[in-house]
Amino acid sequence: MKTIVLLFILATTIATSHGLDLDHGKENKIVPRELKAFSSAHYERDIRCSSWRLGVETNNIIRFKTVPAKCKDYIRNYFLGDQSRADTKAVLSEAYSYAKSLDIIKGANYTWVFDIDETLLSNIEYYADRGFGTIPHNATDFNKWIEKGKLPALPHSLKLYNKLLALDIKIAIITERPETQHKITVKNLWNVGYRKYAKIIFKDTKKEIYKGKTTLVYKLAERKKLEKEGFKIIGNIGDQWSDILGTSTAVRSFKLPNPLFYVA
């Protein structure tokens, strides 16, 4: 009998140590009471905001106009701390691992497509002055910022860009920016190190085909044109799902983190 009791106690101890839910529906007794004291409203708000960000990054939360006001501090800490850089580095490291695993044939027009804003260049300074996405977008204000041509490169994106060129992969850039911003954009890209690409495509707002169309429709149409011109799209990177979804997608596409805004 003693043996049976001892075995039961041992089995219960092992199960508890492995996190099995023996007390489903009851208060979590694993976390020491003294640690629970640190569970403040601020901590719980951050948990909710991290869940909101996950929903955005997985394309489950869509068409939002602003970042929730309660998440301003969380988003600020995400971008100004280490997490955003770490997330970006993880994505782009995987992109490079994929690229160097390919059997690249020189002169075969293997091409990698990049977006610009929040992909090659960063607007975080602009958004930092405007509530980290909690203030509604103002197109006039944003365009004035772009016209300054002072955006810095995203460091890990610039590293990947240079590594792809070293692998003899061509670079194509498709941006939502209008043709009127062509000159200042090219200058900005040149100044921060993006000096070689096979093609850069701006949205010609005068074209009837794109009037009232989403970014997704515009970008997939431009990728189709690239393919017809002989470019073989093996990779695609953007900060919005509309940068990478649709037809004429790459062999592999990579989504950079961006919970600041949503573009359909």
Image (cartoon, helix red, strand yellow):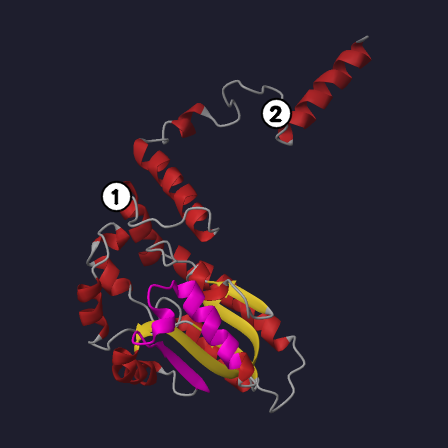
Q: Which mark is residue 21?
A: 2
Apparent side of residue 141 relative to residue 57 in the rendered image (left or right): left
The residue depicted at 49 percent of the width and 19 percent of the height is: 27
Q: Is residue 220 magenta?
A: yes
Asked if residue 220 shows in the view, the reply is yes
Q: Position of residue 225 (x, y in %)?
A: 49, 79
Q: Amino acid at mark 1?
A: Ala
Neighbour class for label 2 at 10 Å: few (<14), some, many (≥20)?
few
Q: Amino acid at mark 2?
A: Asp
- Between 225 and 58, the residue placed more toward the observer is 225
Q: Which mark is residue 218?
A: none
The residue depicted at 30 percent of the width and 74 percent of the height is: 205
162 w.r.t. 220: above or below: below
Asked if residue 163 shows in the view, the reply is no
Q: Marks 2 and 1, Cα distance to the nearest angstrom?
A: 36 Å
- Between 168 and 22, the residue placed more toward the observer is 168
132 w.r.t. 195: above or below: above
253 w.r.t. 103: above or below: above
Say which residue label 1 marks: 69
Q: Position of residue 102 (x, y in %)?
A: 65, 77
Query: Considering the numbered disc 1 on the image, is that residue within a helix, a strand or a loop?
Result: helix
Q: Quadrant of the C terminus?
A: bottom left
The residue depicted at 52 percent of the width and 22 percent of the height is: 29
Q: Which residues are magenta?
A: 197-226
The disc, 2 or 1, on the residue closer to the chain's N-terminal end is 2
18 w.r.t. 233: above or below: above
- Between 147 and 92, the residue placed more toward the observer is 147
